[in-house]
Amino acid sequence: MQTITAVAGLRCVLAEARKAGRRVGFVPTMGYLHDGHLRLVEASRALCDVTVLSIFVNPTQFGPTEDLGTYQRDFARDEKLCRDTGVAILFAPDAKEVYPPPFETFVEPGELAKPLCGAFRPGHFRGVATVVCKLFNMVQPDIALFGQKDLQQCSVIRRMVADLNLPIEIITVPTVREPDGLAMSSRNRFLCAKERRRALAISRGLFAAADEFRSGEREADRLIAIAKRHLAMVDTLKPAESPLRRASALCAAAFIGSTRLIDNVILQQVAI
Ligand code: PAF
């Protein structure tokens, strides 16, 4: 595995790979890797010859009062995990490499970025879209892989790729969960033992609502009420058009202590 910090070096190595006809898969991350990230690497390796994983804690997607300063970092551990999982290139630029001053051009996502996390975290998806667009231009992958846990992020990125004609296939990989159902997230490490137990209410609520959906419930409000019953404190559950006729997702965001966690389940009507 090669660890590269400069865009110029990355371009050189990847130009060689592309000249040799190799397919490039890309997994963008902010580090502090967990099994969810490693599943993305495995999926990329199954589809591509070369997997690039980036680690960059992107300042532009954090609000002024958010956890940028305390966001967990452990580069040595991440590097080892990448090596062990078969990442070919670990791209770890610093902020000056990604945003060389006087940086002033941003990607502004539209309506998809407004509800849910977008409403709660103003400017978040502008930062995500901008850094992902820049990373796509640096890596120029054939495919890029994202976790379903960040469902709204996946939608914003898919729309950006379509709107800006970026020649990249976006692959969404199902959420990886702890054995008790909690969706894996770098932020789970902020939870104390009591909060970790309370956090289970998020996935339990979503699974209970998904069970009701499977039993035929199509009223969005009732499904949301079922999920909410399990949740200690919900900041956003946005209703879809009710009754549900198309595939929908039930998305939850909840503060467990001071840690904001998100999760979702896809409600898919099975054709009979
Ligand atoms: O999902 C994340 O970890 C980040 O939002 C991403 C896509 C790496 C952009 O910084």
Image (cartoon, rainbow, N blue to C red):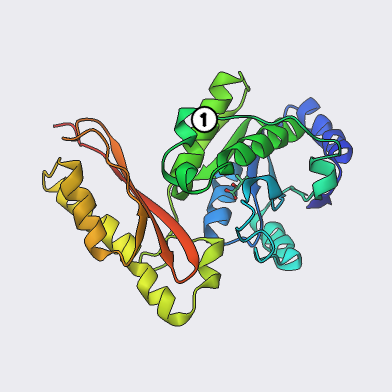
Outermost residue, front direction?
64
Count of marks, rendered view? 1
Q: Residue at x 60, y 58 (%)?
A: 66
Q: Residue at x 27, y 34 (%)?
A: 247
Give the image quarter of residue 239.
Answer: top left
Outermost residue, left direction?
216
Q: Can residue 172 be seen by looking at this rendering?
A: no
Amino acid type for the residue under numbered disc 1: Arg
Give the image quarter of residue 139.
Answer: top right
Q: Give percent across and percent down for residue 48.
A: 62, 37
How many residues crowd mark 1 within 10 Å: few (<14), some (14–19), many (20+)? some
Q: Nearer the viewer, residue 84 or 115?
A: 115
82 vs 265, left or right, is right
Q: Give percent across and percent down for residue 220.
A: 20, 42
Q: Is residue 222 above or below residue 7?
A: below
219 vs 210, left or right, is left
Q: Is residue 134 above or below residue 65?
A: above
Give the image quarter of residue 208.
Answer: bottom left
7 vs 268, left or right, is right
Q: Which residue is mark 1?
A: 158
Q: Can residue 181 be seen by looking at this rendering?
A: yes
Q: Give percent across and percent down for residue 18.
A: 76, 28
83 vs 121, left or right, is right
Q: Give percent across and percent down for residue 129.
A: 61, 35
Q: Residue at x 57, y 25 (%)?
A: 161
Q: Residue at x 28, y 55 (%)?
A: 206
